[in-house]
Image (cartoon, helix red, strand yellow):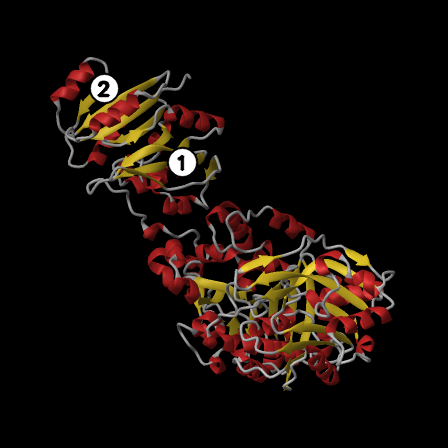
Amino acid sequence: MNDKISIIILTNGHENELESSIYSASRQPLDNKELIIVSSTDNEELRKRSDNGEFKFYVKLAEKLVDLREYALKKSTGNYVYFIDAGDMISDEKLVDLYEKLTTQKADIVVDDIMKLKDGYFHFYSEDKTEVRQVVFNNYLLFLRRFPTFRKLAGILIKKSLFEQVDASVLSAPSQELFAKLFLVSNKTIHVHDNSYIWRESDEHQLPEFEWSMNHLSTLNELVKKNQEDGYQAKIPKKISVAISVDDNTEKRIDTLIYSIYKNTNQLVDIYIIYNKISKSSLQLFNKLAEIFKDKLKIFPTKIPKKIENLLQKISLEGNHLPISAFYRIFLPELLPNLDRILYLDADTLVINDLNPLWQTDLQGAFIGCVPDLAVVVSNSWGEQLLGPEKDNYFNSGVLLLDLNLFRKYSINLYFYQFILETTYFYVLGDQDALNLYFKNAVKLLDIKFNYVFKLLSTMPKNLEDVTILHFLGPHKPWNIWNEIPDEQMVAIRMYRKYRYELYQNKNITEPRISVIVTVQNNITGIRKNLESLLIQDYNNLEIIVIDGGSTDGTYEIIEQMVQDYPNIKYKKAFLNERMKQISLGLQMATGKYIYFLNGQEYVANDNLFTKLMAYKDKYQADIVSTNSGYYVLHEGVYRAYETNDKVIDFSDKTPQELLSMPTKKFKFISGNLINRFLTDNLNSKSDEQDNLIQILAQAKRIIYWDNNAWIKVEK
């Protein structure tokens, strides 16, 4: 190589481990290098070795080692410089690798991760497998915060001419400050993960702490101050405007949210459903909801335009826990150009009080109104890792009141989008982290009642009558099965399900009713999961009928409580030991056009089972849609399932005997079959289950089998 690298060690001449630094520097197989040692005190041994040509040794009186830096740079003759703290080391041949990456990338600076040597053990700061990442203005402080190697000069290969471009006064400044100046004048800085530099930690030799006072990634806080000084008054329309982002995972979940807005708001509301791709059935449902609630709501499905879709595709989701649809909200100023203000709501929220007090909130010149994310701040350290001493200001992005007028006035989205592109590597919670970083001190923090995370019912309980928006943040969604949620949190789950039940009492949007008949007798270990699996179904017209043959083990008490909480559960205790007699009683109570049977120890595997069964029923004009079952062996705690292919097969040409003799027990049980009601009219309660199943199969004209372990049979 033609370039010369100056390896510089600053020392007081008495470090015990100085020899290891010299040795590791001498082992770098560079064609053109020089080793320079500058000490604040003289050292006879070092001077002798310098005279022998092993390295260049200089003495410069100084109180601090950093004061030797400018002198060392003047003595160096290399094109690039590489500092080593006395006692630290560089791995064999690694300086060659760093130089090759620097030149290949046409960079001025290459920053490598370090290994920390402490108490005889090596500690790595990063296991990132990405070979090279570019450091730019938007992400520099994030690199500085995460990687200690950015807070010092040692272990960084730097083009020497950069030192000539910064003010001489900062050459003896703390390393964080000097490196920031060097970065700003560099044409390109890269970060690699070779872990080539070995930092020998001791009480006297600690890695610098991050200077949190530097942690401002935008100037928006200054713009907020300017807005306030100028007496800016936001335009607050009388009509509330709400935006909800959806994707294929949430499009079928926002019906309850829409109903909750209607139920609890006494004024006109425009709802904008932001989507990229959405099913035809969901669009039809939104149109039905708009018609039913037209006295107060207008619903506008709003598709992401191709231009914004292309921008979204450039956003990396590496390491993020949120889908790309979470980033739709950052484009609301462009998507809704005629609105001055918008209330954004996550799909997993529920409005339980009037929105108007939130809508009328004066943001006092801030860009966003939001609620501190106490679930994150209290339960883990993520807020502190991101914002340091201001961790309590970390806010949740599930409810945002946005001043779209201000966003457009300052062209915020143009800069914010670029910021996101260059910083996603550092996110855990997607655009929520981006919003917290970029809008630091540029938001108005609102009362927790406007975004109350339901898990706080266990740690920071609040009367739900005082809450405006309930947020089901985290994995515990009200449409999932959760047997072990604390009772105080189940209050919120039950409220959500009650709202959904109320919504689908409207006959204009309900599907044909399915009566699910659950027969139970002493099934205390399974009945709650059975009913939970039915309550979470996305099919909107399920009637659940529980026939108890006379339980004495506590099953009755569980069912009674759930009946009180959920109006769509009907319960009858009948003291009937035989299942067919229980089924006959259930059929007398059933009002559905279609019937589905389970016993109390069985449960449904997925939350969309009945939607799929009805879709197959409609597609094939079937009288019966049958499925396979998986098995859960209770005493072993093991789940077993047959191999399935998810295909749909027409078995209409098979006799009942042929169907019963098929492998994998496809048609052995009356459970797990969606059956047209008329096929159950003549069941004989005195016959056994299999004889009645044969009768049902014999009457059916069209029998469809879906090869899926759609329900779970529990075996003791």
Q: Mark 2 falls on what kind of element?
A: strand
- Position in image of residue 376 (x %, y %): 42, 62
The residue lying toward the viewer, choosing from 443 and 151, is 151
Q: Amino acid at mark 2?
A: Lys
Q: Amino acid at mark 1?
A: Val
Q: Position of residue 60 (x, y in %)?
A: 17, 28
Number of numbered discs on residues: 2
Tag in front: 2 or 1: 2
Q: Quadrant of residue 80?
A: top left
| Residue 231 visible in the shown view | yes
Q: Quadrant of residue 611?
A: bottom right
Whether the residues at callouts 2 and 1 have beta carbons within 8 Å, the answer is: no
Q: Which residue sits at x=68%, y=52%?
A: 643
What residue does disc 1 label?
185
List the residue tagged with mark 2: 56
Position of residue 55 relative to residue 580, above or below, is above
